[in-house]
Each structure stands twice: as C-alpha cells, then as structure tokens.
Amino acid sequence: MTVYAAPGQPGAIAEYRSRYDHWIGGEYVPPSSGQYFENPSPVTGQTFTEVARGNADDIEAALDAAHGAAPAWGRTSVTERANVLNKIADRMEANLEKIAVAESWENGKPVRETLAADIPLAIDHFRYFAGAIRAQEGSISEIDEDTIAYHFHEPLGVVGQIIPWNFPILMATWKLAPALAAGNAVVLKPAEQTPASILFLIDIIGDLLPPGVLNIVNGFGVEAGKPLASSSRIRKIAFTGETTTGRRIMQYASQNIIPVTLELGGKSPNIFFSDVASARDDYYDKALEGFTMFALNQGEVCTCPSRALIQADIYDQFLGDALERTKAVKQGNPLDTDTMIGAQASNDQLEKILSYIDIGKAEGAKVLTGGGRAEMEGDLAGGYYVTPTVFEGKNSMRIFQEEIFGPVVSVTEFADFDDAMKIANDTLYGLGAGVWSRQGEVAYRAGRTIEAGRVWTNCYHAYPAAAAFGGYKGSGVGRENHKMMLDHYQQTKNLLVSYSGQKLGFF
Amino acid sequence: MADDAISRVAVTDAAAGLLARLRRQHGDLMFHQSGGCCDGSSPMCYPDGDFLLGDADVHLGDLVVTDGPADEPGATGETFTVPVWMSRSQFEYWKHTHLTIDVVPGRGAGFSVEAPEGVRFLIRSRLLTDAEWAAAR
C-alpha cells in the first residue's frame, strides 16, 4: 500500500503550477481577457490551481498558430512524425507515476487506475499510432493499360478537438495521437472540470512537438468551446460528451461543411446468462468482477455497464454474490493505492447522481445497496463521494434509460435469449455492452444481435489500442482507438494519370 | 408540443432568479434537455434560437419567470417565458415524469450559458400523479 502525498503537500511527487495560461504556438500565453478560473480537486473540494479563461480571441490566436504550423507539419515524413509520437510515449513512461498522481488529484479517480490503466493506455496509444502511420500505404487502381488512379493520404490541416473530463489525458490522447500521426495541427479545448492535467502533461512533453502543432485553450464551453466548434478555420471537429451539445456541434459543422466525429455516451447492458453460475470457479469470480465494473472510475465512463441483465434462474443467487462483491469495494482517498473508488469529478456531477437516485426510488426501484452520498472524514469531507449503488427495477424506468455517469447500476432479470436481446436493445444508445456466457455460440449470437459498437465478451472495460471503439444509434459517429481513426483525420487525394500519348478523339 | 395539456415543467426560485440575470446578458433563452455521456441528463440553456429545433424535438412547456422585484438593482420587472425542449426519442422514456429545473454550485461543460457563473442547472424529477397521467393520455 502506498498513499501518495497530494500535490502541494510535503513529499508530493507531482506539483501543479499555481496558474496555467493557454498553450499556444509552443509557449504559455496569458488569456486575452486577463481572467482565470479556479480549479478545485474533487478529492477535497479545495482549489489547487487557476486556469486561463479562454474566449473567441484566444481561440483565434490558437488557430493562427495552428495554421502557421500545419503546412510544414503536414509535409514531414511519416517517419519523423512517428518518431515524435514515440518520444512522447517514452517521456510519458519515464514520468508515469507523477502524471498518474496529477490526474488522480484533478479528476478524483483512484491512483491505482491512473497508474495501471489511464496513463499506460495513453502511452501505448501514441506508440500504436506511430506504428499505424508508418505502416499505412496509399493505393493504386489500374483503370486500363495506360491509366492509373493513385490514392494518397493527406492531412486535413487544422482540426478542433473538445475533450471530456472523465479521462482527461487518455481521452485527449485518443484524439491527439491519430490527428498528429496523420499530420494535422490541433486546437484542443479540455473540459472545464479538468483543465490542468493536460497542461501538466504539456510541461513534460511540450518541447517534443514543433510550436503550433498542438495548441490548448481552456475555458467554458459557451465562451471557448463554441467559437472553436463553430469556426470556419477548422477542417474537422471531434467531440466527446452529451447529445444536445453533440447536435450543436453537428449544426456548426453543417454550416462549415466539415466532418465530425462524436462520442456521446450510452446505457450499456451487461448480460449474464444462466451458465455463468454453473460452477464456482475462476470464471464465476471473473463474471462477478464484470458486474462490479459499474463502479470503475466512479461510473464516469461512457460505457459504464449501468444495466445488469441477469437470467431469471440464477438471478437471486448471482445478484446476492454480486452485492457482496459490490459491498467490498473500498472507497477512500484516491491517492491511496488500495482505494478502488474515489470522488465524482465535480459537485454538479454529485448532485446529478443524487437526483437520479431520488427519481429511481420514486419510480419504485429498490435500493439493494448504497443509495446516497458517502460521508468522508478529515480532508476528504469536502469532496464528492457516492457509495456504489445497486438498484433493482424495470428497463422502462429512467434509471435504466439515462446515463447517470455515477457508480449506479440498475438490475433486472430476463427469461431467455430473446428477452435479453429485447431489453438490451431497448435504449436510445449503442456504445458498449457486456455478454457473459461459457457457451461460445450463445455469446457470439448475443454479440451480433446487440446494437452497440463494442460488445465485451467475457470481459469488460478493456480499452486496448487496435480494438475499434464507437457508437451505434444515439451514441455517436466514428470509431476511435483503431487505425481506421486515421481516415477521420485524412483527406484522400486521387491523381488520375494517363500515360497514353493518344488523344481521345472527342474534339 | 407534447400532445397534452398538463404542466410538465417548473422552475425553482433560485433557478428563476438565475434565468432573469442570464436573460439580461444573453436575451431570450431556451432549454434543451440533454442525454448521454458526461454532462448528459443536464438541461442546456442557450440563447433562444441558438439550437436548431426540428421534428425530432418535443416542446415540454414554457417556464414563466419574472425579473424582479422591480426595485431590485438591475431587475427589469418584466415577465418572460423560457421554452423547454427535449428530443422526441428521449421524451418517450421521460414522459411519465414532471421536471423541475433547479440550480446547484458546479461546473458543467457543454455550451450552456450559466457555466461561467460557477453554477449548473439541474433537473429534479417527480412522477406524474395518476390524475396528470390520465390527462396526459
């Protein structure tokens, strides 16, 4: 067990600056308004740094820098770009522990997750796209003996990216690595709940990129995100967040005729077929862990397995064991490596989760465990903690239909395969799903029937590079985490070339 | 309009006060209830017309707010309405509930206009009563 000292405390391995400006053109630039906003840690509720409050002028300055850098960056060889990405990964790896502590402090998530998942995955992601861009090839089509169509990949130019707060560094990396690999310059707007950890990272890797290739403007959505998303000076916009803002982003994109990629969340079913409980073995133990994955990252994951569907004949027994596993989740100081669940990322997030627990109870769902705020002691008393909560109810209830983005799972039973599929697909969303069965054909059929972009089969919450991630239905547009993401950041240039010396004879 | 005559939306005094202040900055306002990830499930407040509505949306009702009392510094004393919208598909899952827009300290993302104030609009829900549900059908 290790308890890391909090940033700002004696012995801390990660120290934030007391103030962060925008990162534009390879240097820190004060906000044009001169204004900053406070950034509290959800661990304690106390402010630990202040961050530049960006506006349209700051976005323009960042776009100027990006447009200045994009032509040269787009002409660099893929070898050069891949080498830069690999150097970023190496530098992150050498500083992994301190980046992990910094992100935990800003987001509230347990440091064991940032140490074992968020930051190692981000490092691997840069390496994956370094490899993917080196291996990417154009194509040729031989139209006839004398006519050849050549297809080249070209960067889009300057792109905008709006990042969520649940994995501040990993989600930024999911968008940055393919964009940079493909030769684009980026203007990135972090979430206002987690504006600093990406700049903490920039202090470590910022010198590795040519000035202007990556620009970061913080601020509120209405003041900084909107001018970025609606700018006629970006050639693509990528967004992870919710549906109403997703629609607005598409609305702006339609005005500028640019492509969008959107990741808008889900209400993922986690389905446990009868045969899961046919033995008390390692697999059964793994399935119970799979159920409890709703508490990972405090439930603040777009693919949180927030609907558990359990086959009727094992329902009581499996749910009983799952409740025991849930009650064993250790909640506490996120900087303690034994802590399994930390703080929700912000006060309004906490309030929203509590409002959902209220409506769940009002709709007649039964609280089987948890069901309220976790009162913590000492420094943590001001933080935003929710006890892992298991509801039992029906799929028509709002707690089964809306993404609560908290450690809350809604459980119901199903009779047979068809019933499970009907319930699983009765949702507006289709991002993730989990299927648990010892029978390959049941798991396969379920995976193919569920309308979702990612179906974890006998596993959950793994996010390796090379496994495509993205939504069906209301969950969005596009696929991240895979080399196909390069297509979202590239133009196709076709040269149609005639090698014939003969005229057509038309004119 | 949701095709019934019952009241589906309300606003707390604190949220109404904030709406009055925001209207002085931004002009007429509207809400669109979001769904999905991160700040999903939050009501998004925009200058009226900033969000393109269409057949995919349902008008849940209008909040009636008075910017007053008139002797309060800056208050206009005007009474105004704020329409509340939601996507039709989402309404199918929400239609048995009544929504009250409240406000809490916090920091929402998205383009909602209150975020720079250090507060966030929040939905509080209750089930429709049997009488309301009957009238709604």
Image: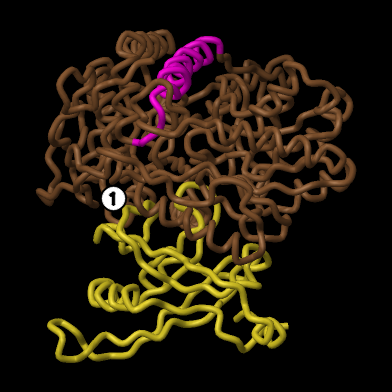
Chain colours: A brown, B yellow
Instruction: Specify whether A61 is left or right of A93.
Output: left
**Residue numbers of the magenta segment:** A107-135
- Of residues A418 and B46, the one nearer the viewer is A418
Quarter of the image with the C terminus of chain A is top right
Q: Is any atom of residue A415 visible in this view?
A: yes
Q: Position of residue A449 (x, y in %)?
A: 82, 39
Q: At 77% from the left edge and 29% from the top edge, which residue is drawn?
A: A436
Q: Which residue is mark 1?
A: A224
Q: Disc 1 marks which amino acid?
A: Ala
Residue at position x 55%, y 26% in the image: A481
Chain to which the residue tagged by mark 1 belongs: A
| Residue A156 makes an appearance in the image | no
B24 over A502 or under it: above or below: below
- Mark 1 neighbour density, 10 Å: few (under 14) some (14–19) many (20 or more): many
Q: Is residue B30 left or right of residue A203?
A: right
| Image location (x, y in percent) of residue B109 | 37, 51
The one of A202 and A167 positioned closer to us in this rendering: A167
